[in-house]
Image (cartoon, rainbow, N blue to C red):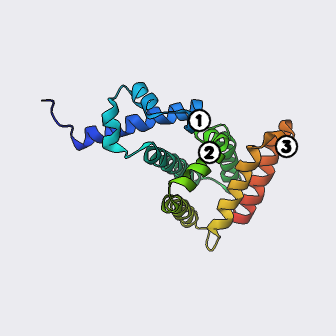
Amino acid sequence: MPRSLTEQEKEMQRQLLLKHGKELSFRYGISRVSVDDIVKDAGVAKGSFYNYFSSKDDFLYQLIFQIHEEGFAEVNQLIDVIGKLSASEKRAQIKRFFLALMNDPKQRFLLKERQEVENFLARHSKDSFAEIEKMEIDNYQKIIAKLSLGEKNPFIIQNYIHIIFFGVSHKELLFVDYIDATVEVMLDGLLNYLEL
């Protein structure tokens, strides 16, 4: 009889499944990736998948939640870096971060699969969608506190960032050669609102 996995080994296996599922979803889209694809790519028995996720929908929800958490972790790292910079260096660093974010595979996935993700979350459960929204608002509030931004509205900040990303996701409506410059102007507006 094989030995039982430790809690640490179980979490490593769960993360392995999420990692491979994320890579496959980035490559093919969430609707085209099956549980069989994920376990095969991860080199894990199919039964093991169901030790960590009750269904493909549960897996996708945890994947989407993790992508959001990772994004906010990156923002928090940025805040730690810019805390010691002058105002102009701070603005320049934030702009570089956002321009790089536009090419980040996680963000490209969320933009490309936006409709699929929204359809999935609406289908999955209202509570799950509310949990992601709450996590986002909580993180924006933490960012506001960490940057000592006072009474700035986290909903305005979230809307502003979403407008930038959704705009960029519709490149067919934009003059492609001017996207980066346009994003930079929009970021100036956000940074002015934040008084950074």
The location of residue 35, given as percent across then percent down, is: 43, 34
- The residue positioned 58% from the left and 40% from the top of the image is 106
Q: Quick one: quadrant of the C terminus?
A: bottom right
Which residue is disc 3 drawn over?
Answer: 173
Which residue is disc 1 drawn over?
Answer: 29
- The residue positioned 24% from the left and 44% from the top of the image is 7
- The residue positioned 38% from the left and 39% from the top of the image is 15
Q: Spatial distance from mark 1 to mark 2, Cα to Cα? A: 8 Å
Amino acid at pointer 3: Leu
Q: Which of 171 and 90 is in front in this view?
A: 171
The location of residue 138, given as percent across then percent down, is: 52, 64
The mark closer to the camera, 1 or 3, is: 1
In the picture as drawn, the residue positioned furthest to the left comes out as 1
79 displayed left or right of 88: left
Secondary structure category for the residue under label 1: loop
Q: Which of 20 and 83 is in front in this view?
A: 20
Amino acid at pointer 1: Gly
The mark closer to the camera, 2 or 3, is: 2
Q: Nearer the viewer, residue 15 or 55?
A: 55
Point out the tag, 1 or 3, that comes first from the N-terminus. Answer: 1
Amino acid at pointer 2: Glu
Report if residue 195 is visible in the image: no
The location of residue 188, given as percent across then percent down, is: 77, 55
- The residue positioned 45% from the left and 32% from the top of the image is 20
Is the Cβ of the residue at disc 1 closer than 8 Å to that at disc 2?
yes
Relative to 2, say whether 181 is above or below.
below
Marker count (numbered) = 3
Q: Which label sits on residue 116? A: 2
Point out the tag, 2 or 3, that comes first from the N-terminus. Answer: 2
Secondary structure category for the residue under label 3: helix
The location of residue 101, given as percent across then percent down, is: 64, 42
